[in-house]
Amino acid sequence: MTTKTTQHLKGAEVEKRWILIDAEGVVVGRLASFIAMRLRGKHRADYTPNVDCGDHVVVINADKVKFTGRKLAQKEYFWHTGYPGGIKSRTAAKVLEGRFPERVLEKAVERMLPKESPLARQQMTHLRLYAGAEHPHSAQSPELVNFAGRNAKNARS
């Protein structure tokens, strides 16, 4: 009688792909969960939790993402200055209008990865966000992924 064992990936055996996502008109949370799954490698049949087996993800038009409901005005991002009483906040609309609008999507993806983990920090380095439609990764020939989380009205246009 033979015993069946699960095959685990080694870091050197992983073949990483490059994918390109156009974020124009896509809901932030749905896109972030799709990206987090791709960064971790959970879409693969040979997924191993302790190995960085995810893909490289390039996102263009990150400034044109959308929020559902009244989140654009009501969702707040908090941070602390380190001084007593130094808690600060900014709404999602202010961040999207600001200097670095891609940080909205970056924070959403970062908060969907494992917390306080060296592996999560390594996986976040494989995410490239660009506010415009241009990106410098054409040499890697990323494959365009048609994001399935789009609603039918946006998919037709």
Image (spheres, rainbow, N blue to C red):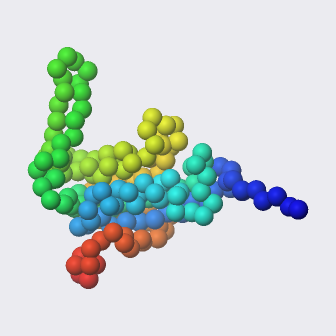
- Residue pushed farthest right? 1
- Residue pushed farthest top? 84
Residue 9 sits in quarter: bottom right
Is residue 8 at least partly visible in the picture?
yes
Q: Is residue 101 left or right of residue 72?
A: right
Q: Is residue 157 above or below residue 69?
A: below
Q: Is residue 129 left or right of residue 44?
A: left
Number of marks:
0
Residue shown at 43% from the left, 46% from the top? 113
Nearest the eye: 2 or 70: 2
Residue 46 sits in quarter: bottom right
The C terminus - image quarter: bottom left
- Residue pushed farthest bottom? 156
Q: Position of residue 63 (x, y in %)?
A: 23, 57
Q: Position of residue 129 (x, y in %)?
A: 35, 54
Q: Position of residue 128 (x, y in %)?
A: 39, 54
Residue shown at 12% from the left, 55% from the top? 70
Q: Is residue 37 above or below residue 94?
A: below
Q: Is residue 45 above or below residue 92?
A: below
Q: Position of residue 20 (x, y in %)?
A: 41, 66
Residue shown at 53% from the left, 57% from the top? 41
Residue shown at 16% from the left, 20% from the top? 85
Is residue 97 at least partly visible in the picture?
no
Q: Is residue 70 left or right of residue 27?
A: left
